[in-house]
């Protein structure tokens, strides 16, 4: 039986990925900050199949302690899914809160590379795989994307560079870059404003968490000689909007 570790598994993409893989016959290590949600996931899917590890992904010491405490049946890791991440605020850069920028960097970049570095030895030993959850925001800039988009651009380049460094090890590395997706993501970004979240998704038929989970499942279960370097996924309702142009008022 194969085993995966999913960060940010308390909601959205992470919870859906855990469910898809466990129902598909895998074991899962589910990590996140909310113990009650992790417990609910493990109780629903089975404690023999889901090990929970509650910690803040930004706390390197707590992360290390949690990984050290993983029980033997879950230690042979075959897949790491770096899903934990967040966006905070939609203001232009000149009006942003620097603390929010730092929180996004600490979560989306620093924590991701920390857990990846820690788990590379077992993934190499197992000839496993890494799937990083990026975003189209890392490819296509937009007003208000500033640091969030930059962190997701890092995720893409880190993934591609990992592929280069892991050449010859058999470890596969992929990055999935979703577009408009309806999860708690926008609710968090807008400080809990449910109306703003609802307005963004209204009538758009956005990507669902289950869609991303299915894409992750497909990548992980391809023959071991195949690697998906980068998978960009958007709902049909979303397309590229072109460049913006500022025009001075006529004299």
Image: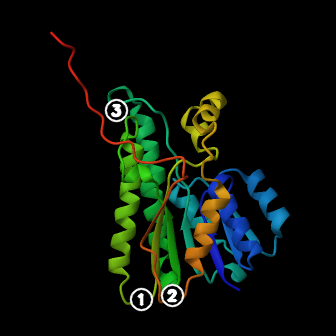
**Label 2 neighbour load within 10 Å: few <14, some 14-19, many 20+:** some
Residue at image position (68%, 79%) is: 74
Q: Quadrant of residue 191?
A: top right
Q: Closer to the camera, 30 or 144?
A: 144
In space, the residues marked 2 and 3 are separated at their CA atoms by 42 Å
Which residue is drawn at the image coordinates 59% and 53% (left, top)?
Answer: 56
Q: Quadrant of the C terminus?
A: top left
Looking at the rendered structure, the number of numbered marks drawn on it comes to: 3
Q: Which mark is residue 93?
A: 3
Mark 1: few, some, or many residues within 10 Å (few <14, many ≥20)? some
Whether 58 is drawn above or below 28: the answer is above
* Residue 197: image location, x then y, percent: 61, 35
Quarter of the image where one finds residue 219:
bottom right
Circle 2/circle 1 CB separation < 8 Å: yes
**Neighbours of disc 3 within 10 Å: few (<14), some (14-19), many (20+):** some
Residue at horizontal 37 percent and vertical 26 percent from the top: 95
| Secondary structure beneath label 3 | helix
Q: What residue is disc 2 on?
A: 127
- Residue 134 drawn at (x, y percent): 46, 58
- Residue annotated with mark 1: 169
Residue placed furthest toward the top: 251
Q: Earlier in the sequence, mark 3 or mark 1?
A: 3
Rendered residue at 37%/35% (across/down) = 143
Q: Secondary structure at mark 1?
A: loop
Closer to the camera in the image, 211 or 12: 211
Residue 245 visible in the picture: yes
- Mark closest to the chain's N terminus, 2 or 1: 2
Earlier-in-chain disc, 2 versus 3: 3
Q: Horizontal and vertical percent for residue 198?
A: 64, 34
Secondary structure of the residue carrying tag 2 is: loop
């Amino acid at each position: 039986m194969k085993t995966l570790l999913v960060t940010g598994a308390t909601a959205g993409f992470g919870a859906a990925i855990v469910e898809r893989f466990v129902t598909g016959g895998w074991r899962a290590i589910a990590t996140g900050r909310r113990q009650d949600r992790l417990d609910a996931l493990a109780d629903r899917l089975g404690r023999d199949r889901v090990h929970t590890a509650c910690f803040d992904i930004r706390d390197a010491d707590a992360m290390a302690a949690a990984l050290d405490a993983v029980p033997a049946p879950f230690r042979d890791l075959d897949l790491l899914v770096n899903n934990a991440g967040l966006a905070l605020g939609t203001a232009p850069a000149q009006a942003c809160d620097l603390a929010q920028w730092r929180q996004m960097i600490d979560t989306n970049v620093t924590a991701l590379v920390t857990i990846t570095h820690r788990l590379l030895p077992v993934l190499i030993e197992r000839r496993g795989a890494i799937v990083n959850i990026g975003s189209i925001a890392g490819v296509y800039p937009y007003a208000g994307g500033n640091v969030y988009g930059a962190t997701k651009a890092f995720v893409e380049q880190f993934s591609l560079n990992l592929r280069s460094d892991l050449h010859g090890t058999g470890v596969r590395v992929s990055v999935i870059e979703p577009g408009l997706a309806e999860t708690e993501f926008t609710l968090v970004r807008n400080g809990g404003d449910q109306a703003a979240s609802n307005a963004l998704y209204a009538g758009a038929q956005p990507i669902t968490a289950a869609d991303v989970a299915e894409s992750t499942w497909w990548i992980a279960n391809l023959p071991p000689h195949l690697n998906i370097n980068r998978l960009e996924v958007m709902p049909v309702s979303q397309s590229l909007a072109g460049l913006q142009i500022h025009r001075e008022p006529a004299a």
